[in-house]
Amino acid sequence: MAARAEALVNEVLLDVRGVSKRFGGFTALDGVDLVVKPGERLGLIGPNGSGKSTLVNCITGALRNEEGSIHFEGTDVSAQPPHRRIRLGLARSFQIPKPFSSMSVLDNLRIPLLYAARQHERIARDRISDVAMDILRQVGLADKADAMSGGLTQVDMRKLELARAVAAKPKLLISDEAMAGLSTSEVDEILALLTSLNRQGIAIIMIEHIMRAVMKFSERLAVLVAGRKIADGDPQTVASSAEVVKAYLGE
Amino acid sequence: MSNKLFAAVAFAIAVAIAAGSQLIGNEYFFTATYTVLQFIILATAWNILGGYTGYVNFGTAAFFATGAYTAVALYNAFHAPLIIMIVAGTVAAGLVGLAVGYLTLRLRGVFFAIATLALAVVLYTFVVNWDYVGGARGAYILQPREIPLGLPRYIHVLYIAMVFMCAFALVVARAIETSTLGRGLAAIRDDELAAECSGVPTLRLKIFSATVSGALMGMAGTTLPYYLSYVEPSSAFSLSYAVNSIAMPLIGGMMSWLGPLIGAVLLGTIQQIVQVTVSSAWNLLIVGVLLVLFVTLAPNGIMGWFDAWLRARRRS
């Protein structure tokens, strides 16, 4: 039994089972199933209002789902508040950047390092700055470490969002439209960044509208339409399936 | 500076002030300075929840009066020594802070502010109807006849107690500010959801913040009965405590422990001077005018203005 449980843990990182979420009479999510394996790159697409962000909020705990369950590494996290989930390694970036604007860029990273990463990884107090600088170097914000985070440009804010999520030392990172509104070269920068994070072993769910980036990045593609998952599989097959094309372009 | 060193320095300064001011012959100095010191504590305490954590509390008077009325109750019960009044009043107000925090800190922004205002009204009504502490009539509290340390009058004792409580409040505020906890509170102030999603246990930290803030406000009130010799609800729950404890950090700066200290010394001293030279009726008007000036001209307070000036100088 224990061996079986371990095998399951090894295979599945995130297991979303039949998750439903309603706002009053509106059903935002309707029995969504989603599985992410360790180190996987999953693309999640869907028209505006299809429930992608609601799903992220349910997975990370910002919203509670009324039905279904969310398991992370075999533990049911459905009833846990967000700060517990991130400590387990379930991180997200926000679609609209939410920097701690009274703090410098470096101090922004201290929060997850102190409150999340240290829960499962011993980081000496005097090493925190170094670890934060390493992450900033990786995302290309090292020269802005002392700048106030409220005054960053859009692309830098997106990088900060990702850096702050990474600082929690996650096993899964959900990138919620980190590229929306960015220029082509900036999109490539974020894409390269997410790819390099994935190479370090972090599983990534990329939520995005920019198909070029999603197709390039994803090993697997899931499609959400009106709160239901209508497709999940090989990106090429999914993107060209009649149902998905219909959902995007109409008949 | 480490917290231990800061505490040592703060208490050394407190000893120096307490001893040095005994050379001052003017009795009124102690009465006036007592009020300024009391406002330093209230402003510092308010800032822990209001400045560090970003939750505006309009109920300062409720916590302050909890401290004062705990002292009155203990006086009526067995003429408790001052130190017991101080400790018990601090604990009682801390418990009120804990309860209020637990019940209301799920509310955000303006809803929390309204809830704290309601708390003041509820406690006021409770005290007005509580006969044991004098109810609406108020209670007379006679200062003890024996005065410790060979001091000339009891106001000296209260003044010295206030000096040390002040040092204690500043040490606590600074320790919170510079700790991991302080960073967590700042994250809550900046963006609560982002803080929670970065691993900060926001509810627990907010409740902690409300408890400490309430406890320190209560502490400032524990010596009020002896100071006034007569306590009645409308003075213990006076609106001026709430207004001043918000205005002082706002004027001094809310990001660090120094801001409320500067704001309270400045505003408190001006009020005391005006009270003697012009009239006490001017006090709240002065607060109002200064508040308008600062909100429009230096929204981050004196400390914020000073920081900006330093940064500009370094750049040029």
Image (spheres, coloured by chain):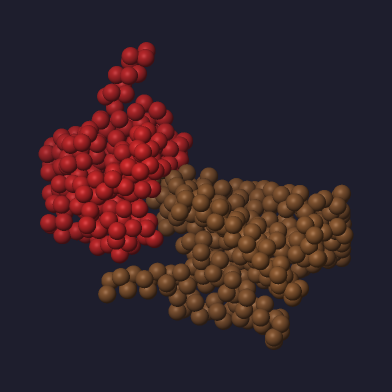
Chain colours: A red, B brown
From this viewpoint, is residue B23 visible? yes
Q: How many numbered marks appear?
A: 0
| Image quadrant assignment for residue B311 | bottom left
Compared to residue B62, the image places residue B84 above or below, namely above
Front position in the image: A115 or A28 = A115
Percent of width and height locating residue B45 = 59, 59
Compared to residue A15, the image places residue A23 above or below, namely below
Front position in the image: A29 or B234 = B234
Front position in the image: A66 or B102 = B102
Percent of width and height locating residue B254 = 49, 64
Q: Residue at x 71, y 64 (%)?
A: B159
Percent of width and height locating residue A199 = 18, 36
From this viewpoint, is residue B210 visible? no
Percent of width and height locating residue B122 = 72, 58
Q: Residue at x 80, y 51 (%)?
A: B81
Q: Quadrant of the C terminus of chain B?
A: bottom left
Indicate left or right for A19 with A152 as reference: right
Indicate left or right for B258 with B143 as reference: left
| Image quadrant assignment for residue B121 | bottom right
Q: Quadrant of the N terminus of chain B?
A: bottom left
Which residue in the rendered view is the most extreme toward the bottom? B278
Indicate left or right for B298 with B32 as reference: left
Q: Residue at x 86, y 57 (%)?
A: B146
Compared to residue A115, the image places residue A185 above or below, namely below
Q: Residue at x 32, y 47 (%)?
A: A129
Front position in the image: A92 or A145 = A145
